[in-house]
Image (cartoon, helix red, strand yellow):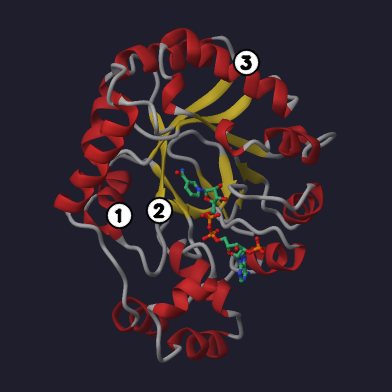
Protein backbone atom coordinates (compact mmCIF):
# COMPACT_ATOMS: atom_id res chain seq x y z
CA UNK A 1 0.00 0.00 0.00
CA UNK A 2 1.39 3.42 -0.95
CA UNK A 3 1.10 6.16 1.63
CA UNK A 4 0.83 9.88 0.89
CA UNK A 5 1.44 12.87 3.07
CA UNK A 6 -1.78 14.50 4.29
CA UNK A 7 -1.36 18.12 3.13
CA UNK A 8 1.75 19.51 4.88
CA UNK A 9 1.03 17.77 8.17
CA UNK A 10 3.88 15.25 8.11
CA UNK A 11 1.24 12.55 8.69
CA UNK A 12 1.09 9.84 6.03
CA UNK A 13 -2.16 8.14 5.07
CA UNK A 14 -2.76 5.24 2.66
CA UNK A 15 -3.82 6.20 -0.84
CA UNK A 16 -6.68 3.68 -0.59
CA UNK A 17 -8.83 4.11 2.51
CA UNK A 18 -12.08 2.51 3.62
CA UNK A 19 -15.36 4.35 2.97
CA UNK A 20 -18.38 3.48 5.10
CA UNK A 21 -21.47 5.19 3.68
CA UNK A 22 -24.17 2.50 3.37
CA UNK A 23 -21.72 0.13 4.98
CA UNK A 24 -23.23 -3.01 6.49
CA UNK A 25 -20.25 -5.34 6.59
CA UNK A 26 -19.56 -5.35 10.33
CA UNK A 27 -15.98 -5.25 11.56
CA UNK A 28 -14.50 -8.00 9.36
CA UNK A 29 -14.06 -6.12 6.05
CA UNK A 30 -12.63 -3.11 7.89
CA UNK A 31 -10.18 -5.32 9.80
CA UNK A 32 -9.18 -7.03 6.54
CA UNK A 33 -8.49 -3.64 4.94
CA UNK A 34 -6.49 -2.46 7.93
CA UNK A 35 -4.36 -5.61 7.78
CA UNK A 36 -3.63 -4.87 4.12
CA UNK A 37 -2.48 -1.34 4.96
CA UNK A 38 -5.71 0.62 4.38
CA UNK A 39 -5.31 2.21 7.80
CA UNK A 40 -7.68 5.07 7.07
CA UNK A 41 -11.42 4.84 7.69
CA UNK A 42 -13.91 7.48 6.61
CA UNK A 43 -17.23 7.74 8.41
CA UNK A 44 -19.73 10.48 9.39
CA UNK A 45 -22.11 11.19 12.22
CA UNK A 46 -24.92 10.85 9.67
CA UNK A 47 -23.84 7.33 8.54
CA UNK A 48 -24.96 5.73 11.79
CA UNK A 49 -21.94 3.42 11.94
CA UNK A 50 -19.30 5.20 14.02
CA UNK A 51 -19.72 2.49 16.70
CA UNK A 52 -18.77 -0.21 14.18
CA UNK A 53 -15.68 1.79 13.21
CA UNK A 54 -14.79 2.08 16.90
CA UNK A 55 -15.15 -1.69 17.29
CA UNK A 56 -13.05 -2.37 14.18
CA UNK A 57 -10.12 -0.36 15.56
CA UNK A 58 -10.36 -1.67 19.13
CA UNK A 59 -6.85 -2.50 20.34
CA UNK A 60 -5.20 -0.96 17.25
CA UNK A 61 -6.61 2.57 17.45
CA UNK A 62 -3.23 4.27 17.26
CA UNK A 63 -2.40 2.57 13.96
CA UNK A 64 -5.54 3.75 12.15
CA UNK A 65 -6.36 7.23 10.88
CA UNK A 66 -10.04 7.97 11.60
CA UNK A 67 -11.93 10.61 9.64
CA UNK A 68 -15.49 11.52 10.47
CA UNK A 69 -17.85 14.32 9.48
CA UNK A 70 -20.18 16.75 11.12
CA UNK A 71 -23.60 17.37 9.59
CA UNK A 72 -24.38 20.97 8.50
CA UNK A 73 -27.39 21.22 10.80
CA UNK A 74 -24.88 21.06 13.68
CA UNK A 75 -22.66 23.93 12.51
CA UNK A 76 -23.54 26.36 15.32
CA UNK A 77 -20.75 26.67 17.89
CA UNK A 78 -22.29 24.67 20.75
CA UNK A 79 -23.60 22.02 18.34
CA UNK A 80 -20.13 21.50 16.81
CA UNK A 81 -18.67 20.80 20.24
CA UNK A 82 -21.58 18.50 21.16
CA UNK A 83 -21.39 16.57 17.86
CA UNK A 84 -17.66 16.02 18.24
CA UNK A 85 -18.13 14.72 21.81
CA UNK A 86 -20.83 12.33 20.62
CA UNK A 87 -18.69 11.07 17.72
CA UNK A 88 -15.78 10.52 20.11
CA UNK A 89 -18.03 8.45 22.35
CA UNK A 90 -19.42 6.38 19.47
CA UNK A 91 -15.94 5.85 18.01
CA UNK A 92 -14.71 4.93 21.49
CA UNK A 93 -11.64 7.12 21.14
CA UNK A 94 -10.19 10.26 22.72
CA UNK A 95 -9.41 12.00 19.43
CA UNK A 96 -10.63 12.20 15.85
CA UNK A 97 -7.78 12.41 13.33
CA UNK A 98 -9.68 14.33 10.69
CA UNK A 99 -12.94 16.19 11.39
CA UNK A 100 -14.69 17.26 8.21
CA UNK A 101 -17.55 19.68 7.54
CA UNK A 102 -19.80 17.35 5.54
CA UNK A 103 -21.44 19.98 3.32
CA UNK A 104 -21.48 23.78 3.43
CA UNK A 105 -24.18 25.36 5.58
CA UNK A 106 -25.63 28.45 3.92
CA UNK A 107 -27.31 29.73 7.08
CA UNK A 108 -24.62 29.54 9.78
CA UNK A 109 -21.63 31.88 9.30
CA UNK A 110 -18.52 29.81 8.55
CA UNK A 111 -16.53 31.88 11.10
CA UNK A 112 -18.76 30.55 13.91
CA UNK A 113 -18.26 26.93 12.81
CA UNK A 114 -14.52 27.30 12.33
CA UNK A 115 -14.06 28.95 15.74
CA UNK A 116 -15.59 25.82 17.29
CA UNK A 117 -13.42 23.55 15.12
CA UNK A 118 -10.29 25.39 16.30
CA UNK A 119 -11.44 25.05 19.91
CA UNK A 120 -11.63 21.28 19.34
CA UNK A 121 -8.09 21.27 17.92
CA UNK A 122 -6.80 23.22 20.95
CA UNK A 123 -8.51 20.74 23.26
CA UNK A 124 -6.81 17.82 21.48
CA UNK A 125 -10.18 16.32 20.50
CA UNK A 126 -9.52 16.60 16.78
CA UNK A 127 -6.15 16.71 15.04
CA UNK A 128 -6.98 18.15 11.61
CA UNK A 129 -9.78 20.09 9.93
CA UNK A 130 -11.18 19.10 6.54
CA UNK A 131 -14.13 20.03 4.35
CA UNK A 132 -16.36 18.06 2.02
CA UNK A 133 -18.49 19.13 -0.96
CA UNK A 134 -17.16 22.70 -0.75
CA UNK A 135 -16.48 24.70 -3.91
CA UNK A 136 -13.15 26.49 -4.33
CA UNK A 137 -14.82 29.73 -3.25
CA UNK A 138 -16.29 28.10 -0.16
CA UNK A 139 -12.91 26.57 0.66
CA UNK A 140 -11.24 29.97 0.43
CA UNK A 141 -13.86 31.45 2.77
CA UNK A 142 -13.48 28.53 5.17
CA UNK A 143 -9.69 28.93 5.23
CA UNK A 144 -10.00 32.68 5.78
CA UNK A 145 -12.21 31.99 8.81
CA UNK A 146 -9.48 29.92 10.50
CA UNK A 147 -6.96 31.75 12.65
CA UNK A 148 -4.28 29.16 13.35
CA UNK A 149 -5.11 26.02 11.40
CA UNK A 150 -5.05 25.01 7.78
CA UNK A 151 -7.70 23.04 5.97
CA UNK A 152 -5.87 19.82 5.16
CA UNK A 153 -8.36 17.98 2.98
CA UNK A 154 -11.26 18.33 0.59
CA UNK A 155 -13.52 15.30 0.25
CA UNK A 156 -15.33 15.40 -3.08
CA UNK A 157 -16.82 13.09 -5.64
CA UNK A 158 -14.16 11.97 -8.11
CA UNK A 159 -13.88 8.98 -10.39
CA UNK A 160 -12.92 7.99 -13.89
CA UNK A 161 -16.46 8.87 -15.00
CA UNK A 162 -17.16 11.92 -12.79
CA UNK A 163 -14.43 14.42 -13.34
CA UNK A 164 -16.13 17.62 -12.19
CA UNK A 165 -13.23 18.43 -9.83
CA UNK A 166 -10.89 18.72 -12.81
CA UNK A 167 -12.65 22.02 -13.55
CA UNK A 168 -10.57 23.84 -10.93
CA UNK A 169 -10.86 22.20 -7.54
CA UNK A 170 -8.13 19.63 -8.16
CA UNK A 171 -5.74 22.37 -9.29
CA UNK A 172 -6.66 24.51 -6.28
CA UNK A 173 -5.93 21.60 -3.92
CA UNK A 174 -2.59 20.97 -5.60
CA UNK A 175 -1.62 24.64 -5.46
CA UNK A 176 -2.54 24.99 -1.79
CA UNK A 177 -1.27 21.58 -0.61
CA UNK A 178 -4.68 20.25 0.30
CA UNK A 179 -5.22 16.49 0.01
CA UNK A 180 -8.17 15.58 -2.19
CA UNK A 181 -10.11 12.63 -0.78
CA UNK A 182 -12.02 11.07 -3.67
CA UNK A 183 -15.42 9.73 -2.68
CA UNK A 184 -17.52 7.36 -4.79
CA UNK A 185 -14.32 6.46 -6.68
CA UNK A 186 -16.12 3.44 -8.19
CA UNK A 187 -19.13 5.63 -9.06
CA UNK A 188 -21.14 3.61 -6.49
CA UNK A 189 -20.54 0.35 -8.37
CA UNK A 190 -18.69 -0.97 -11.41
CA UNK A 191 -21.97 -1.32 -13.33
CA UNK A 192 -22.22 2.49 -13.34
CA UNK A 193 -18.69 2.82 -14.70
CA UNK A 194 -19.57 0.35 -17.44
CA UNK A 195 -22.33 2.68 -18.71
CA UNK A 196 -19.59 5.16 -19.70
CA UNK A 197 -17.36 2.48 -21.17
CA UNK A 198 -19.54 0.68 -23.69
CA UNK A 199 -16.66 -0.97 -25.52
CA UNK A 200 -15.10 -2.15 -22.23
CA UNK A 201 -11.73 -0.49 -22.61
CA UNK A 202 -11.27 -0.97 -18.90
CA UNK A 203 -11.15 -4.74 -19.43
CA UNK A 204 -8.48 -4.23 -22.09
CA UNK A 205 -6.32 -2.01 -19.85
CA UNK A 206 -6.92 -4.30 -16.87
CA UNK A 207 -5.78 -7.38 -18.75
CA UNK A 208 -2.71 -5.54 -20.03
CA UNK A 209 -1.86 -4.38 -16.51
CA UNK A 210 -2.63 -7.78 -14.96
CA UNK A 211 -5.18 -6.12 -12.65
CA UNK A 212 -8.98 -6.04 -12.34
CA UNK A 213 -11.30 -3.32 -13.66
CA UNK A 214 -11.92 -1.98 -10.16
CA UNK A 215 -8.18 -1.85 -9.46
CA UNK A 216 -7.55 0.07 -12.67
CA UNK A 217 -10.42 2.46 -11.86
CA UNK A 218 -9.00 3.18 -8.40
CA UNK A 219 -5.39 3.39 -9.55
CA UNK A 220 -6.43 5.98 -12.16
CA UNK A 221 -7.94 8.03 -9.35
CA UNK A 222 -4.83 8.10 -7.15
CA UNK A 223 -2.39 8.80 -9.97
CA UNK A 224 -2.14 12.42 -8.73
CA UNK A 225 0.16 12.88 -5.73
CA UNK A 226 -2.46 14.93 -3.91
CA UNK A 227 -5.32 12.39 -4.28
CA UNK A 228 -6.35 9.46 -2.08
CA UNK A 229 -9.54 7.40 -2.60
CA UNK A 230 -12.00 5.83 -0.17
CA UNK A 231 -13.97 3.05 -1.90
CA UNK A 232 -16.63 1.39 0.22
CA UNK A 233 -16.97 -2.37 0.25
CA UNK A 234 -19.21 -4.57 2.38
CA UNK A 235 -17.47 -7.65 1.07
CA UNK A 236 -14.04 -8.76 2.25
CA UNK A 237 -13.08 -9.89 -1.26
CA UNK A 238 -13.85 -6.40 -2.59
CA UNK A 239 -11.76 -4.83 0.18
CA UNK A 240 -8.82 -7.08 -0.74
CA UNK A 241 -9.22 -6.26 -4.42
CA UNK A 242 -9.36 -2.54 -3.68
CA UNK A 243 -6.20 -2.64 -1.58
CA UNK A 244 -4.52 -4.23 -4.60
CA UNK A 245 -5.21 -1.00 -6.51
CA UNK A 246 -2.17 0.50 -4.79
CA UNK A 247 1.53 -0.30 -5.07
CA UNK A 248 1.82 -0.12 -8.87
CA UNK A 249 1.22 2.46 -11.62
CA UNK A 250 -0.71 2.56 -14.87
CA UNK A 251 1.69 3.39 -17.70
CA UNK A 252 1.34 6.61 -19.76
CA UNK A 253 -0.35 4.82 -22.69
CA UNK A 254 -2.89 3.20 -20.40
CA UNK A 255 -3.58 6.54 -18.73
CA UNK A 256 -4.04 8.14 -22.13
CA UNK A 257 -6.58 5.49 -23.14
CA UNK A 258 -8.53 5.93 -19.92
CA UNK A 259 -8.38 9.73 -20.05
CA UNK A 260 -9.43 10.11 -23.64
CA UNK A 261 -11.47 7.10 -24.62
CA UNK A 262 -13.84 6.60 -21.70
CA UNK A 263 -16.75 9.01 -21.47
CA UNK A 264 -17.21 11.01 -18.28
CA UNK A 265 -19.46 13.68 -16.84
CA UNK A 266 -18.32 17.05 -15.61
CA UNK A 267 -20.81 19.35 -13.92
CA UNK A 268 -20.63 22.93 -15.20
CA UNK A 269 -20.82 26.15 -13.18
CA UNK A 270 -24.56 26.65 -13.79
CA UNK A 271 -25.48 23.09 -12.84
CA UNK A 272 -23.31 23.33 -9.71
CA UNK A 273 -24.94 26.64 -8.76
CA UNK A 274 -28.37 24.99 -9.22
CA UNK A 275 -27.43 22.17 -6.83
CA UNK A 276 -26.16 24.68 -4.30
CA UNK A 277 -29.33 26.72 -4.52
CA UNK A 278 -31.45 23.58 -4.02
CA UNK A 279 -29.37 22.62 -0.97
CA UNK A 280 -29.60 26.14 0.42
CA UNK A 281 -33.42 26.08 0.08
CA UNK A 282 -33.41 22.60 1.64
CA UNK A 283 -31.44 23.86 4.64
CA UNK A 284 -33.68 26.91 4.96
CA UNK A 285 -36.78 24.71 5.19
CA UNK A 286 -35.11 21.93 7.19
CA UNK A 287 -35.31 19.02 4.77
CA UNK A 288 -31.64 18.63 3.91
CA UNK A 289 -28.73 17.49 6.13
P1 LIG B 1 -18.11 3.61 -4.18
O1 LIG B 1 -17.04 3.32 -3.22
O2 LIG B 1 -17.78 4.30 -5.45
O3 LIG B 1 -18.90 2.28 -4.57
C1 LIG B 1 -19.38 1.37 -3.62
C2 LIG B 1 -19.97 0.17 -4.35
O4 LIG B 1 -18.94 -0.47 -5.10
C3 LIG B 1 -20.55 -0.88 -3.42
O5 LIG B 1 -21.72 -1.38 -4.02
C4 LIG B 1 -19.48 -1.97 -3.39
O6 LIG B 1 -20.00 -3.27 -3.24
C5 LIG B 1 -18.91 -1.84 -4.78
N1 LIG B 1 -17.52 -2.28 -4.81
C6 LIG B 1 -16.53 -1.98 -3.94
N2 LIG B 1 -15.39 -2.57 -4.31
C7 LIG B 1 -15.65 -3.23 -5.44
C8 LIG B 1 -14.87 -4.04 -6.29
N3 LIG B 1 -13.58 -4.25 -6.05
N4 LIG B 1 -15.45 -4.57 -7.39
C9 LIG B 1 -16.75 -4.35 -7.66
N5 LIG B 1 -17.55 -3.61 -6.88
C10 LIG B 1 -17.01 -3.06 -5.78
O7 LIG B 1 -19.29 4.46 -3.52
P2 LIG B 1 -19.54 5.28 -2.20
O8 LIG B 1 -19.86 4.39 -1.07
O9 LIG B 1 -20.55 6.32 -2.57
O10 LIG B 1 -18.19 6.07 -1.92
C11 LIG B 1 -17.18 5.60 -1.07
C12 LIG B 1 -17.13 6.34 0.25
O11 LIG B 1 -17.00 7.74 0.05
C13 LIG B 1 -18.39 6.25 1.10
O12 LIG B 1 -18.55 5.00 1.68
C14 LIG B 1 -18.18 7.38 2.06
O13 LIG B 1 -17.23 7.04 3.07
C15 LIG B 1 -17.64 8.44 1.12
N6 LIG B 1 -18.71 9.32 0.58
C16 LIG B 1 -18.71 10.62 1.01
C17 LIG B 1 -19.68 11.48 0.56
C18 LIG B 1 -19.66 12.90 1.04
O14 LIG B 1 -20.65 13.63 0.85
N7 LIG B 1 -18.58 13.33 1.66
C19 LIG B 1 -20.67 11.07 -0.35
C20 LIG B 1 -20.64 9.75 -0.79
C21 LIG B 1 -19.64 8.89 -0.32
P3 LIG B 1 -20.06 -4.06 -1.82
O15 LIG B 1 -20.41 -3.04 -0.77
O16 LIG B 1 -21.07 -5.09 -2.05
O17 LIG B 1 -18.69 -4.67 -1.54
- Front of the two marks 3 and 1: 3
Dot label at residue 66: none
Is residue 251 at least partly visible in the picture? no
* Lower sequence index among marks 1 and 2: 2
Residue pointed to by mark 2: 157
Please give the label number shown on residue 165. 1
C-alpha span from label 3 to label 1: 32 Å
Q: Measured along the vertical axis of the image, is residue 54 above or below residue 20?
A: above
Local packing at callout 3 (Cα closer than 10 Å; few below 14, some 14-19, many 20+) is some
* Quadrant location, the C terminus: top left
Give the mark nearest the N terminus, 2 or 3.
Answer: 3
Report x, y in % for residue 262. Answer: 35, 80
* Local secondary structure at mark 2: strand
Q: Quarter holding the N terminus?
A: bottom right
Q: Vertically, is 131 above or below 158?
A: above
Measuring from the top left, give residue 38's x and y in whole percent.
Answer: 67, 52
The residue at 27%/48% (across/down) is: 169
Amino acid sequence: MNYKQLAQTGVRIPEIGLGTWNYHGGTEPLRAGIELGARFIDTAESYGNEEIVGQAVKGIRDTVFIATKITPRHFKHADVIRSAEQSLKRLNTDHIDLYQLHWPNYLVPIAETMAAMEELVRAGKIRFIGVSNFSVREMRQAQAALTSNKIVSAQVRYSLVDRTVERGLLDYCRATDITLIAYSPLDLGMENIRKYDRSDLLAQVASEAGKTRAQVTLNWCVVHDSVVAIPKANRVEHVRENCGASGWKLNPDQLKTLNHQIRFRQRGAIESAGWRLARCIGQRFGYSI
